Image: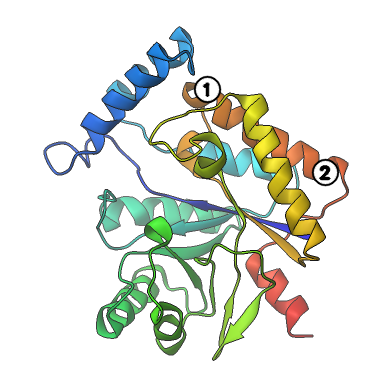
Amino acid sequence: MKAIISHDIDHIKVSEHLFRDMIVPKYMARMHVELVTGKISLREYILRWSDFFKNKWQNVDELITFNNVNGIPSSFFIAVNKGVGLNYSNQSALLWIEQMKSRNCEIGIHGIEFDNKELIKKEHDLFSELTGIKNFGIRMHYVRNTSETFNLMSECGYSYDSTEHSFKNPYKIGNMWEFPFQLMDGWVIENGKSWQSVDLEKAKENTLRIIDKASSENLKYLGIDFHDRYFSHSFKTWLNWYIWVVDYLKQNKIEFINYAEAIRELEK
């Protein structure tokens, strides 16, 4: 089994949400709940206020650096459309896309449209036009999908998708490879809540159960989704969890690979 680690970019700046959605009030409520319940320290609480006033809700550069040091190919999904609490501009997205390109990252689209073929195709073509990338994949924001979503994405020209959450090996839908993923940061740390509800040790236990199941199901690839937003000391449990996951996989001789490399393996 090999590991494919990817990162969804949901936020870039605090200011993109002011007076536009409920993300900031939810952020405030969340960090107070986590402080009162003892899930975060006073230092983390203060650092979250610091992030807020710095207008910095992304940690892309820091995450790429960590991945490079640890031999992990960086794969990012970034949006060129707004929706469901994702509100950054294409100008902001393109600034980061250029940095990702310069650092040899794999770049796909964090999709918004999932149930209308015309809008899915429009989103696909806009991403290609803005970035100059012709062959790329997608993961839907909030992994939204219907029974027709994957077929529609294939028909619209995506080379791969990683929206499905299941314990399956990659499979083809038309010309598109579907890469089901098994592990997402929020699912093991929030554990069904809208805030951090478990400590690091419990998150590790949750994670090991998933990794063991993936191994017992003889999966070729373990799919992991970690959001760049949480690669920060203001989210210490999330940061330490990601560092631990990487170290655990390295200790167990699990190779890191990206989607393009996996597709080349699958198509041999």
Task: Give the residue displayed 35% in from the left and 42% down from the top.
Answer: 12
165 or 63, nearer to the observer? 165
Residue 233, numbered circle: 1
| Residue at the left extreme, as displayed | 19
> Looking at the figure, which quarter contains the N terminus?
bottom right
Horizontal and vertical percent for residue 28?
Answer: 27, 24
Is residue 91 in view?
yes
129 or 32, nearer to the observer? 32
**Pointer 2: residues within 10 angstroms few (<14), some, or many (20+)?**
some
> Looking at the figure, which quarter contains the C terminus?
bottom right
Residue 250, numbered circle: 2
Q: Secondary structure at mark 1?
A: helix
| Residue at the top extreme, as displayed | 42
Horizontal and vertical percent for residue 255?
Answer: 81, 55
Amino acid on which disc 1 is placed: His
Q: Secondary structure at mark 2?
A: helix
**Vertical placement of residue 85 versus 243, above or below:** below
Residue 175 picture quarter: bottom right
How many numbered badges does the structure rendering display? Answer: 2
Q: Is residue 90 left or right of residue 266?
A: left
32 or 76, nearer to the observer? 32
Amino acid on which disc 2 is placed: Lys
